[in-house]
Image: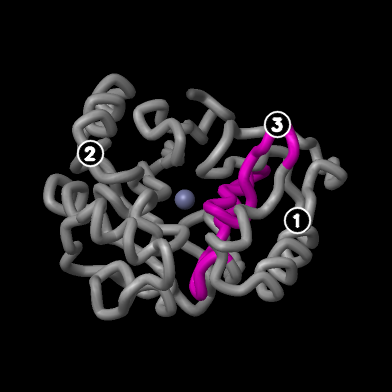
Amino acid sequence: MKITDKVYALDSTRGNYAYIIYDDDVILIDTGRPGQGKGILKELNSMNIRPEDIKHILITHHDVDHIGNLALLEKVSDARIWASKEDIPYIIGDKNRPGIKRMVSILMRTGKPGNISTYPQKQEIEDIKIIPTPGHTPGHVCLLYEDVLLAGDLLRNSKGQLKPLASFMNDDETALRKSIDKIDQFSFKWVCPAHGEPIKIDNNRKQILRK
Ligand SMILES: [Zn+2]
């Protein structure tokens, strides 16, 4: 699904959208849940993107429905993989996810990616700004590209309103609300969440709720 000339939601990951930024380089944001890998590759192929065209894979946070095909995509591409230093231990299995997420990660096994880089200090990769937005997970990030905010699981689209996920899904509610305040400082027209459809808000912040 085309969002702007350069940003696409991958329909093969509907329910937990991964996104493609198609600029000079191809950049993948998140990788869907386990089992969606073949669909992702097929969809990329339909967009004339070969796996080896993917230059970077940026992970918003460690949840299984975002890293589900990271190991597969690492294998078939030469992409450099990036995530936050707080969330990498969960992705590579050095730390157990808390609460219900631990159960989910036992039921939905993910392969183990080999090589993940920590987001650079300057908080930029090519033209994408990395915005640390802890709360849903300790190292959650949002990504800002042109006028599109790739929101990960900071906010979901629930019937046209953007709100946080249910509190039992979040690591730290206070940090989460601070993170929502933080993204308010940035200008963007589109919000692309993982859960729920991308939404054009044209800087109308009334659609962003804090709970
Ligand atoms: Zn999610």
Disc 1 marks which residue?
Answer: 211
Highlighted magenta segment, given as a residue range: 136-161
> At x 85% / y 41%, what residue is drawn?
204
Q: Farthest top residue? A: 46
CA–CA distance in space, label 1 to label 3: 14 Å
The answer to whether residue 130 is visible is no
Sooner in the amino-acid sequence: mark 1 or mark 2: 2
SS type, badge 3 = loop
Q: Is mark 1 within 8 Å of ligand 1?
A: no
> At x 57% / y 29%, what residue is drawn?
3
- The image quadrant of residue 49 is top left
> At x 78% / y 48%, what residue is drawn?
208
Image location of residue 110, percent across then percent down: 21, 55
Image location of residue 16, percent across then percent down: 44, 41
Disc 3 marks which residue?
Answer: 159
Image quadrant where one finds the C terminus: bottom right
Residue 99 lies in the magenta stretch? no
